[in-house]
Each structure stands twice: as C-alpha cells, then as structure tokens.
Image (cartoon, rainbow, N blue to C red):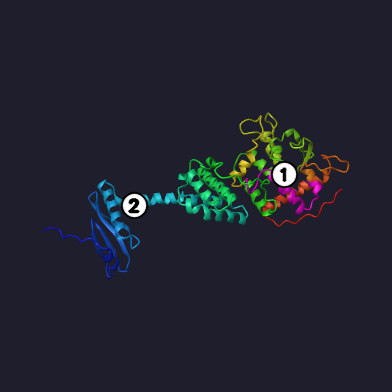
Amino acid sequence: MCPKRVEPLTDTAARNAKTTTKPIKLFDGGGLYLEVSPTGSKLWRLKYRHLGAERRISLGAYPNVGLKEARAKRDEAKALVAAGQDPSDAKRQEKVRAAALAADSFEAVAREWFDRHLSTKAAGHRDKIIKRMERDVFPYLGRRPVSAITAPEILAVVRRIESRGTLETAHRAQQNIGQIIRYAIATGRAESDPTPSLRGALPPTKGGHMAAPADDPKAVGGMLRAFDAFKGGPVVRVALLLLPYLFCRPGELRTMRWEQIDFQAAEWRYTTSKTNSDHVVPLSHQAVALLRDLEPLTGHLPGGWVFPGGRSPLRPMSEAAINAAYRRLGIDTKTELTGHGWRAVARTMLHERLKFPVEVIEHQLAHAVPDALGRAYNRTRFLEERKAMMQAWADYLDRQKAGATVVELSKVRKG
C-alpha cells in the first residue's frame, strides 16, 4: 500500500487552526508541521533523521514566522542533514555566535566603556556623550561587531551629523567612536582603530582656548580621581598628579630637573620657557610628597630629569605624554582638558573661589605683570603670599577630589 500523500498546508489553514484539549499537528510536507497547543500557541517544527535517529527542531512561532519562511528554514535544515550535519547543533552554535556578537557589538562595548571611563565625570557630561551616541551613532553602528567597523562606515555617520550644521558634534562623535574602539582593542575585541585614517575628512572646527573645566569644580574633582586610577608607568602617573598642583606649563614640567628642586625650602626654581626669566614655584606638602616618592626611581639616572623619557633616561618625557595619558583615561583633550588647561583652571578658581589677588596669581603663572618700578617680572615678589596660595590650592584640589564641601578662603591681603 502506498503511503498517504500529505497535502501542503495553506496559510489560511494555519491561521484558522482551532485549539483542542490536546496538541494537534498540521503537516505541510518534508517533515514540516505546525503544532497547535491547547493554549492556542502555534509552533513550527521539523521532523528529520540524523545518524539513524529521529529528531525534531523548532523553526519559530506562527504568525511571526509565516508559512513561506518556515518552508525556507525547513529546506535549509534538510540541506544541513544532507551534508551530514545536525540542524539542532547548528542552531545552538548560531545562538552562541549571536550572543558573542551581541557582547562584542559596538553598542555593548560602548556602554561598557561608559561605565568604566565616564563614572568619574560630571553627570551632565556623561549624559551628553551617551545621548550623542544613542541619537547619532548606535542606530547605524550599534549592532555591528566592533572589530568589523570600517573607516567609511564611521565617515558616513559623522557626515550625517555634519549635514545638520553641527560640525563640532560630528568631530566629538568621531573622537568618541575612536575612544570606544581603542577600548575594544585594549580588551581584546578589536585589532585596529580606523579613526586615524579619517583625519582631514571633516572640515576643521575653529580653534579656541585650551580645554579646561575652569568653571566646574565637580568636573575637576572627577578628573583628579581619574588620575588616581591611572594604570600607566610611575613617571607619567606622578606627572599627572603633580601638574594640577603646580599649574605650570606642561613643557616646563616635563623638563624639570632634580637639581632645580630644593626640598628644604620646598621650592622649584627654573627658567621659564616663554619669557626666559627665572621663576620660583613654591611646593605644597602634596607636591613635595609626590617628588619624594619619585626620587628613588629617577633621581639617580643620567640626564638629571625628574621625568625621563621611556626610551632613554638622557631625554625628558615626551611632550605628548600627558595629553596621551588623558586620552587613555577617556578625557577629551579637545573639549574637556589639556595639560595646559590647568593654568586656566587655577587662574579662575584661585581668584573667584579662593579669593586670591590677581597680581599674586599672575606672578605665580610667570606672566609679565609690571610692578611699581616698571619691571615686567620679579621672581621673588609676593613669594610668601604665593607659598600660602600654593598650599591652599593643593588643599582645595584635595577637597575637590574627595568630593567634600569646600569653604572658600577669605581674601588674602597683600603684605
């Protein structure tokens, strides 16, 4: 007797299938059938044989998976069987692969980067970056494996932002994308960063002042906490921690020599790079402690540099080292902070928040401030006031880093 022929299932029959007290099966052919449960759910299943054993696999729920799509999935599964593979194993492997891709998607990596690198930033700053990515980047790159993102894809995203007339936002988005991909490289989920090849692809923004959070004490405190978490070498780490206390020019800090440090007087004496004049920087207790900690590491090296270069002790630390460390910490050196920006932070906060006289601050900045005799600069003028100011400034920064309420100092009188 010939086996009974199964009539192909129709979409109407699938749609109108009624529930009963027991599951029913509506066969389509080739092992495909629609199982209707007593609860009313309808599930596509495929019956097949592999290695002599009968097996079943789910192909999705109706009507989310229609009849045409179910047949296509049946044909794909039967092709695997014909090739000696088990469709059930292939489905499990695909789920694992999809989960891995989801974990390594650009959006997943980006949100992990947010949690790790923006936690110390001001809430407003964090929200601004996250909203920028959610609005302009995730819809186009979010589901892409971070390792597969290419320069043309990024360019298309930032040009779409630029087309709205928001060029600066486009530049910031490109920079954020680069930071996220570099984090992916560091965590083993990508191998290269395509953003450097986009240099010059967008029109430049107009130049401005050195980036610095001069009006945001909370942002300053967050950055100082980020510096504490720096995982790089001890030389760069001390430079990061010391620069806010001294607010000198970064080039002067990196070329600091041990012979210029007088621990007994708690002073650093050197010739300024901009005006070529002798300058005195009073050292706070915190600055002295940092230098004391570093002295056993670099104080005996040839060259005499406090911050020697990584390749040779005969040369000072690279001029790009501090800003590179900022970027490594996730700090945007174009919009948030540069090494030079601490001068603006100190100038503003010392006067507006700690109430120190402008002329005392300007002398500590080694700016040309004519005195009553017409002299442009006097390295020892206001020295006692500057010693008090530098200690007060270091204490102020420490309070900001701790997140404590700051009580402003009363205005210092000139002696």
Mark 1 residue type: Phe
Kindly tell me whether residue 189 is visible in this rendering.
Answer: no
Give me the residue at 85% from left, 49% from top: 414
Front-most of 155 and 307? 155
Q: Position of residue 323 (x, y in %)?
A: 63, 42
Per the model, the C-alpha gap separating discs 1 and 2 is: 60 Å
Q: Nearer the viewer, residue 260 or 75?
A: 75
Instruction: Please identify the quarter of the rendering in which residue 125 is found.
Output: bottom right
Label at residue 247: 1
- Quick check: can you spot residue 404? yes
Residue drawn 61% across and 31% down? Answer: 311
Magenta stretch contains residue 48: no
At which x and y percent is residue 55?
26, 54
Place of residue 58 in the rendered image (x, y in percent of width and height, measured from the top left): 31, 57
Q: Which image quarter holds the N terminus?
A: bottom left
Which of the marked residues, 1 or 2, is nearer the chain's N terminus?
2
SS assignment at label 1: loop
Estimate how packed mark 2 is, as few (under 14), some (14 to 19) or many (20 or more) residues with alpha carbons within 10 Å: some
Q: Which residues are magenta?
A: 333-361
- Residue 339: say if magenta: yes
Q: Which residue is mark 2?
A: 91
> Mark 1 packing: few (<14 Cα in 10 Å), some, or many (20+)?
many
Label 1 close to label 2 by CB (< 8 Å):
no
Check disc 2 and give the amino acid type: Lys
Give the left or right position of residue 211, taking residue 389 as reference.
left
Camera-side residue: 47 or 141?
Answer: 141
Q: Position of residue 45 (x, y in %)?
A: 29, 58
Question: What's the residue at 70%, 41% (across, down)?
Answer: 290
**Residue 373: assigned label:** none
